[in-house]
Image (tube, helix red, strand yellow):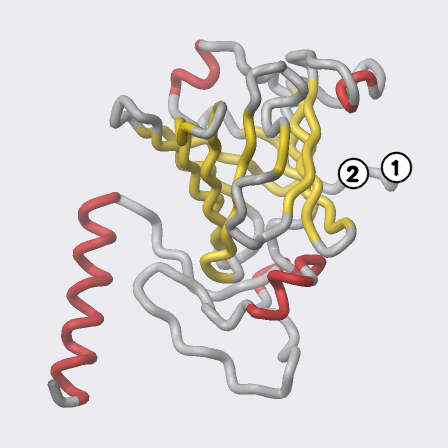
Amino acid sequence: MNRTRRQFAVVWIGMALILAYGLPLLGRGGRGGQAGEARAKLAEAPLIGFFGSYRVAADKTDPSKLPIIGAWRINFDKSDPVMKAQARFKGSGTVIYTAVNGGIKQEVFLFYPPKDDSYKTVYTDDGREFWFKLDGKNIYENPQGPNGLGQTVGMWLVDRNTLFRERATKGVIDERVLYRVSPDGKTLVWTTFNPAGDSGHVVWDRIELPRR
């Protein structure tokens, strides 16, 4: 296949994926709409379809500059209506991603600020915290908090704007999620896929929180 035909095939594959899944176009981009500083004095890798730069080796071991890092507030108006109906989150529902020890700590809060920090060690709907590396190993415990269900999670860095999550309960995969950050760095979308074949979207807006 010559170069022109290869490029044509790539374009059609990208368009097919977009039409099939209804995913918003996500180009490269970092926080504040920037592509991020050139880390290794290399030209930015080309984009493919809705994906951002796939040159992510450095980000896997040091995720501190990924656009997902920071605090996000739920946006019910843009999320699937069922999210508000289920009352899984209050209007101040918040998720925070922090780079820690070569990985990422994720904290999810039903409302913010939380009453206390008991969610760190005790299962509660008010909040939960877990830590993971972007190595695709399904070994990181308690992604839903210490609920006693034997749950683990594996996380992949697809590109600088996209993470893929796969959760298992006692070794059986039962949830998959795409985390996608918009090119301007202001919006985060969780797209969930469960074993029943259903999917849904949870939309978050970037916010600034006081240093804790």
Q: Residue at x 59, y 67 (%)?
A: 34
Camera-nearest label, 1 or 2: 1
Task: Using the rendered image of the protein, determine whether residue 51 is visible from the camera's viewpoint.
Answer: yes
Left-right relation of 143 to 208: left
Q: Position of residue 136 (x, y in %)?
A: 51, 50
Q: Position of residue 208 (x, y in %)?
A: 74, 42
Q: Which mark is drawn over residue 27?
A: none
Q: Quadrant of residue 206?
A: top right
Q: Quadrant of residue 92?
A: top right
Secondary element at image label 2: loop
Residue highlighted by disc 1: 212
Disc 1 crowd rating (10 Å Cα; few below 14, some 14-19, many 20+) is few
Three-letter code, disc 2: Leu
> Does the CB distance between marks 1 and 2 fall below 8 Å?
yes
Residue highlighted by disc 2: 209
Which sits in the foreground, 145 or 92? 145
**Farthest front residue?**
171
| Quarter of the figure that contains the C terminus | top right
| Quarter of the figure that contains the N terminus | bottom left
